[in-house]
Image (cartoon, helix red, strand yellow):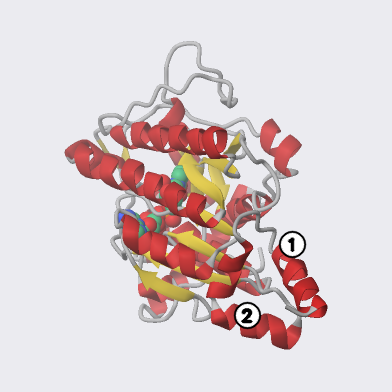
Amino acid sequence: MMVRERHERTAFVSDVRRTHDAHRHWHNDALKVHYEATGDPMTSVLITGGAGFIGSNLADSLLADGYDVHIVDNLSTGSVTKIPTGASFHEVDIRDAAGLNEIAGTIAPATIFHLAAQADVRKAIENPGFDADVNVIGTLNVLEAAHACGARVVFSSTGGAAYGEYPGLAIPTPEESEPRPMSHYGMSKMAGEGYCGLYHRLYGLDVVVLRLGNVYGPRQDPHGEAGVVAIFCARLLEGIAPTVFGDGLQTRDYVYVGDVVAAFRAAQTKGVGQTINIGWGQEISVLDLLDGLGATVQPVFAPARAGELQRSALANARANDILGWSPEMPLAHGLRRTYASIAVTHANPSARPPGFLDVLGN
Ligand SMILES: NC(=O)c1ccc[n+]([C@@H]2O[C@H](COP(=O)([O-])OP(=O)(O)OC[C@H]3O[C@@H](n4cnc5c(N)ncnc54)[C@H](O)[C@@H]3O)[C@@H](O)[C@H]2O)c1
């Protein structure tokens, strides 16, 4: 190998911050050709669950910064309309270890953002085995693939469902608090976190765990079971009274998807070995949300749903210290943007739903 070639190759490898098997970078001919032609390393990243709400917003942000973005998704709750045209889509289930390994080995991502999950609390209670299969075995498969290709993993975990609710639990809840999940979903996410810790200790894998609050914002699906903000927006657009379960005084930590994407982006270079809450640290009730959306229709009250927490909010000092992150989008503005995005999709259901980068203004 010529000295110049060797130098370029070394620079490329160091540019993409890879630590394992430098030759793997060259498996991807497109990247190699691009690098040789332009000198730009064009780092590749992989997003599991990139056809979903948060993952597709993250994909938009990474594409805007010039990353070579790959998405793995089985489209169980995600949709092809959410996938940006600039991303490469691999329709693969994270329970398929061989399929995942092949993709990760070929593209050699610098970072795997692991967002694919069974994220429905009620489905988890109905079918705990399926929930564990996706959230525990699927996460294990992602970690194995990352270990094989030396990628950093940023794991999308949960705050409220992980901590649960018990006497003496501080609210807003700091990361030092003992997690006592009250649902199979919270439990399977905790098991995923446990494996993240293991791969960090055992193999020195770069892993960051983000425990998210209740994420809301543009491109959230108003048709699913989750996402009360999107559901309320759709109801209000149609002039239908929103349903409030329980007394509406139950609280959550609502955090805007653009802020959550910023936290994922910060975790590309910071926070290795850490578990970090991503939330506002403020309790917002369901009735507060309706007020914030300017609802003039009276809600219909229905019985409280079993297993729901009464109060939840996440302390965010660690996110500030370690990631240099703090939330920026005030709730009122975020709610207006969410409503605006759902109005666009309502008017044109076959178009790509606008994401946080598309919905501007107040
Ligand atoms: N939205 C929130 O408020 C919130 C809060 C805490 C944690 N999280 C976590 O953030 C992540 C993303 O959540 P979201 O709100 O964008 O949900 P989402 O349902 O919109 O996205 C999840 C994506 O994962 C895909 N997926 C599911 N099972 C899969 C499998 N077996 N193989 C491959 N792909 C699969 C789905 O098709 C979907 O595109 C999840 O891990 C969720 O647990 C979300």
Q: Which sits earlier in the primary sequence, circle 1 or circle 2? A: 1
The residue positioned farthest toward the bottom in the image shown = 37
Left or right relative to 198: residue 244: left
Query: Percent x, y for residue 278?
Result: 59, 41
Query: Label 1 vs label 2: CA separation?
Result: 14 Å
Residue depicted at x 74% and y 85%: 38
Identify the residue under disc 2.
32
Residue depicted at x 49% and y 57%: 54
From the image, which quarter does the C terminus lie in? bottom right
Comparing 323 with 247, the one in front is 323
Comparing 133 with 203, the one in front is 203
Left or right relative to 353: residue 282: right
Identify the residue under disc 1.
14
Query: Percent x, y for residue 31?
Result: 60, 78
Comparing 261 with 266, the one in front is 266
Q: Secondary structure at mark 2?
A: helix
The residue positioned farthest toward the front in the image shown = 1
Residue depicted at x 50% and y 46%: 155
Residue depicted at x 36% and y 50%: 117
Q: Secondary structure at mark 1?
A: helix
Q: How many marks?
A: 2
Q: Quadrant of residue 140?
A: top left
